[in-house]
Image (tube, rainbow, N blue to C red):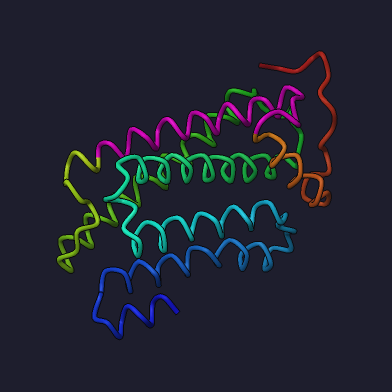
Amino acid sequence: MASMAALVSGNWEIAFVALITLVVSIMPVLVAGYAGLVVPRTFITAIVLFVFATLFLGEVLDFYNRFWWWDIALHGGSAVGFGLIGFVAVFMMFQGDRFAAPHIALCFFSMCFAIFIGTVWEVFEFAMDQGFGLNMQKSGLNDTMGDLIVNLVGALLAAAVGYLYLIGRERAFLASLIAEFVERNPRFFGKAQPKRRTDRY
């Protein structure tokens, strides 16, 4: 609806952002359904809230300009989210065996995954600004570097959350999201087990 309204009013930037946001929002659910994964309601709720904050509050209601910290909060939040997704993905490759690799290695992968996604997004913003005359980078280099720094901090936070999960703090902070995902998809995490004192760090 937002995309159609923006097209009618000639606001191409919002229309484009609305379309991209819609695709990005439903893609995880579609991929999960194709792979036979059960996506917890918490994950879906987080995606919906992020889309709402990005599109309607950020673009339509101009929160990006009204609140200087809005873009920082969203970039940081998305980095944490993608970091958790990266952690779950590599943890799934080991079938939930938290002893199959050093904890630091698993957390490092999740951090790299979040940084990669954030970097690709900044390249996308640059391409849209150069190719279609948009202003997704806002203040240019300062905006891009600020986003990358915030993305790094969010990625580090996600790695820390993954580490908490691996050492047995499944209910601590956001680690409960990982625990919920593992519990709802037992066939992908057949080797998941409680933490033992012989864990490798």
In-image side of 92 versus 28 (left or right): right
The image shows residue 39 at horizontal and vertical percentages of 70, 57
Quarter placement of the C terminus: top right
In-image side of 96 versus 60 (left or right): right
Res 144 → quadrant = top left
Quarter placement of the N terminus: bottom left
Residues 21 and 109: in front is 21
Q: Is residue 131 magenta?
A: no
Report the residue at 45% width, 55% height from top.
53
- Image label count: 0
Residue lying at the far bottom of the rendered structure: 8
| Residue 178 vertical placement versus 26 (above, below) | above
Report the residue at 62% width, 64% height from top.
29
Report the predominant secondary structure element of the magenta stretch: helix
| Residue 109 vertical placement versus 40 (above, below) | above
Q: Which residues are magenta?
A: 145-173
Report the residue at 60% width, 39% height from top.
87
In-image side of 9 versus 52 (left or right): left
In-image side of 193 versus 154 (left or right): right
The image shows residue 15 at horizontal and vertical percentages of 33, 74
| Residue 118 vertical placement versus 47 (above, below) | above
The image shows residue 7 at horizontal and vertical percentages of 31, 82
Residues 101 and 53: in front is 53
Residues 61 and 189: in front is 61
Report the residue at 55% width, 30% height from top.
159
The image shows residue 21 at horizontal and vertical percentages of 43, 65
Q: Is residue 153 magenta?
A: yes
